[in-house]
Amino acid sequence: MRNIHKYKYHVLIWSIYTAYEVAFSGIINSRSSTIDYYIFYSISQISLFYFHSEVLLRHVLEGEKKVNSFLLIFLVLIELILFICIKYGCQIFILRYIKHDIQYSYTINRADLAEMVWRPMYFMGYSTGYYFLMRVGRQRRLVEEMQQRELKNLIQEKEMKNELILTQNAFLRSQINLDFLIKTLDSLYDETLYPAPKAAETILHLSDMMQYALSEEASTGFVKMKKEINLIENFLILHQARQARLAQLKLSYNMDSLSIEFIPLVLMTLTENILKHGQLDNPQKPAEIKINYENSILRIETSNYESINSKIPSHGIGLKNIKDRLSLTYGEAAVFQYYLDAENYFHTSIQVKI
């Protein structure tokens, strides 16, 4: 359908021109030729038109090798001679061997010779104009596409610069008085160790978390999965200390995954999503975080029963951030999927070839 729509104007123009030729020929000659003559005549002229523009001129003028004007003129003359020979050769063959016109004899006078040369040149002239018109259109579309790509690249570059500035600002804010904050937490730990050991342990976990999350190591490209898991374990301990009921969340991993380097804080985002949106008070429906590395594939899978009465906005920004970071870092080597199943369990799955 697309090709038909593309060439509908070609068909319309050629139909109008053929009708004009038939009518004009009938008026001049006071009689009309047979339909097969007009079909043969139209096919031959249309073929010459498109061969001249789409094959000869396009190949010669747009090819890798530059062709001088003398060679182009020579090729056009060869094209003209071949067309005349093929056309009138086919005409003689059809009359003698298909229509069996035995008495047919073909003689060429000056008028016939002039028509043999002039009519093809007439169509070749129109074909040349058509070629240059289409060439200007193609070049214009190419320029517009290049401008659109350039504009898109400028927009993306500006967005990346804005994101970089925001990231740098966030990192600078995180570094403000970091040493002071860590030393304060250490001091609180020392003061509460004996009178309130449980509170001291909580402070220690918080200090470890903040030291890692705000450290230069976590802001670089990759960290050991072992440190990410330790971060999650500390985070879960702090979460449990704040809750009256024990959150039903299982974290499991194989030993091979501990030494794998991975982009930081992805596990933290997944864990926060579970704690925000999951219903974790039912031992029969525990949430799970599974980390496994096998056959050069790192798999991180989570599942949790969604809380029906949750007032917290649904998943969105955090998961999009994970998807963008995985795509930017690993490209097609990473696959990130998430969905809510029929039993109201929310699943996420990350697979990365490392």
Image: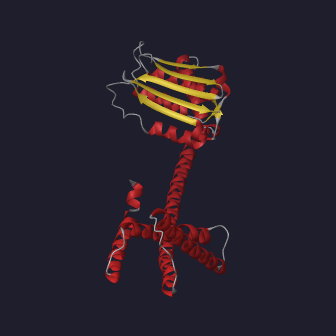
Instruction: Residue 80: give x, y in percent of width and height.
Output: 56, 76
Residue drawn 55% across the image and 41% down it: 327
Q: Residue furthest bottom?
A: 110
Residue drawn 47% across the image and 36% down it: 319
On screen, residue 326 above or below 39: above
Identify which residue, 188 or 209, lies in the foreground: 209
Instruction: Residue 256: give x, y in percent of width and height.
Output: 66, 22
Left or right: 220 with respect to 122? right
Residue drawn 34% across the image and 79% down it: 24
Quadrant, the C terminus: top right
Q: How is the image coloured?
A: secondary structure
Q: How many marks?
A: 0
Instruction: Residue 29: give x, y in percent of width and height.
Output: 35, 81
On screen, residue 195 above or below 81: above
Residue drawn 49% across the image and 69% down it: 91
Q: Does any portion of residue 16 appear in the rendered image? A: yes
Q: Residue furthest front?
A: 103
